[in-house]
Amino acid sequence: MATTSYSGIGRYNYKLLPLSLSSITRCPCHSSPSKALVPARPRVVKLNFVFDDRKSVLRLGRDGGLARRRVITAVARVEPEQLGEVSANQEVNKGDKLSENEDLLSEHQQKASQLRKRIVFGLGIGISVGGVVLAGGWIFTAFMAAAVFVGAREYFDLVRSHGITAGMTPPPRYVSRVCSIICAVMPIITLYFGQIDISVTFAAFVVAMALLLQRGNPRFAQLSSTMFGLFYCGYLPSFWVKLRCGLAAPALNTRIGASWPILLGGQAHWTIGLVACLISISSIIAADTYAFLGGKTFGRTPLTSISPKKTWEGTITGLGGCVATSIILSKIFCWPTSLISAIAFGVLNFFGSVFGDLTESMIKRDAGVKDSGSLIPGHGGILDRVDSYIFTGALAYSFVKYFLPLYGV
């Protein structure tokens, strides 16, 4: 038997309607009255009803928007001969609009929460990396080894993903794990011996023999993906250790070094390697930031099909920001003293970062994934954060070591 009822959802009020309890629990998309709306988990969302001047509360499930729309639809459709066809349709439309507004609000809140996570964790990572770079030595090397190990595991997980394995045979799991350990050891060998050419060659030979002598039918795709993993995840990142710890000549003209505390190493702590690392890392951060802002504001022309969101306008803006940052920091650190050298260093860092970014995007695209991992909330995996730095370390070290006369002084 229908009773006169008043329903209120949050701040939305609806007029008095004849309402039956069976119409509330029935889903509008099914004709059978036996299908009742059963909430899976309780939530704070409440629905107030007044049955003959007595107030009752109905709690809805986690899918609050859908449940409220069903209730409103049920209210609108009960006894349409009394409400009229037009009135019922209006109430149904109100329920649909309410659900759409709630979905938009929920999506907006999700994006805001994601942005907050990115900012918080980004600042935390930036401060931590800055402290590690300033410390140098074993602290910097141990940090690099840990990051390389995690990045290598992510790389081999991408190689084993469904998108890539559909067209090739991945290396065995034990080979992937051994290669991840070898990659993590490379920065340590670099710090101890100063170079890793012989070690990398020997490791590549051992891994290749293990693949060729495995049971079953060895594939060239296994060999090529493994060799590239050793090069991409181990050999190239080790150049950051060579840049930071290998170029130990003091930056005598650096004003910050003159006032650096003796307990923290004094002026001798500010070496060419430290200054070059700070300029290179800061230039890459500036390139990514300016490229993002420029692409959002002016982006019209796609850069490449590998990464559809990148545009030529954003790339040019990123190049300008990278070079400007390199010039400004060269004036602050008084290294390199030549303006042409500072510009060339900024351009080199920019192209290294873009090439590394596109390389990782190509791997992820073939793997059919958006992020290489989920280690860093709001950022993805390690490879998603360091892809711009993988090739840049080798380019920066070669430029400072072999092309700047007397380390740019």
Image (cartoon, rainbow, N blue to C red):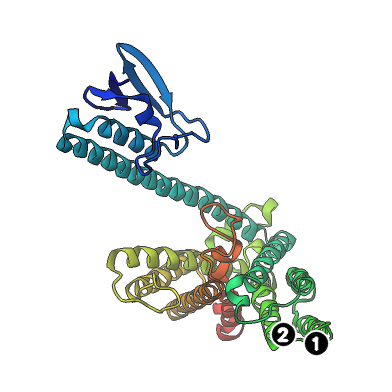
- Residue 250 visible? The answer is no
Q: Residue furthest top?
A: 53
Instruction: Return the residue at label 1.
Output: 212
Q: Label 2 to label 1, Cα distance in Å?
A: 8 Å
Q: Quadrant of residue 310?
A: bottom left
* Residue 240 in picture, x, y percent from top left: 64, 71
Give 237 or 324, whichever is nearer the viewer. Answer: 237
Left or right: residue 75 compared with residue 279: left
Give 128 or 303, whichever is nearer the viewer. Answer: 303
User: Looking at the image, which residue is at 23% across and 41% down?
Assistant: 93
User: Looking at the image, which residue is at 40% across and 20% down?
Assistant: 57
Query: Which quadrant of the rendered structure holds the N terminus?
Result: top left
* Residue 275 in picture, x, y percent from top left: 57, 67
* Residue 73 in picture, x, y percent from top left: 30, 36
Instruction: Return the residue at label 2.
Output: 223
Secondary structure beneath label 1: helix
Seen in the picture, residue 59 relative to 262 is either above or below; the reply is: above
Secondary structure beneath label 2: helix
- Residue 224 visible? The answer is yes
Q: Quadrant of residue 250?
A: bottom right
Seen in the picture, residue 117 relative to 239 is either above or below; the reply is: above
Seen in the picture, residue 364 relative to 340 is either above or below; the reply is: above
Give 298 or 73, whichever is nearer the viewer. Answer: 73
Amino acid on which the number 2 mark rests in the picture: Leu
Residue 306 is labelled as none
Seen in the picture, residue 286 relative to 337 is either above or below; the reply is: above
Amino acid on which the number 1 mark rests in the picture: Leu
Label 2 or label 1, whichever comes before in sequence order: 1
Q: Residues within 10 Å of mark 2 (few under 14, many from 20)?
A: many
Task: Check if mark 2's residue and mark 1's residue have beta carbons within 8 Å.
Answer: yes
Q: Residues within 10 Å of mark 1 (few under 14, many from 20)?
A: some
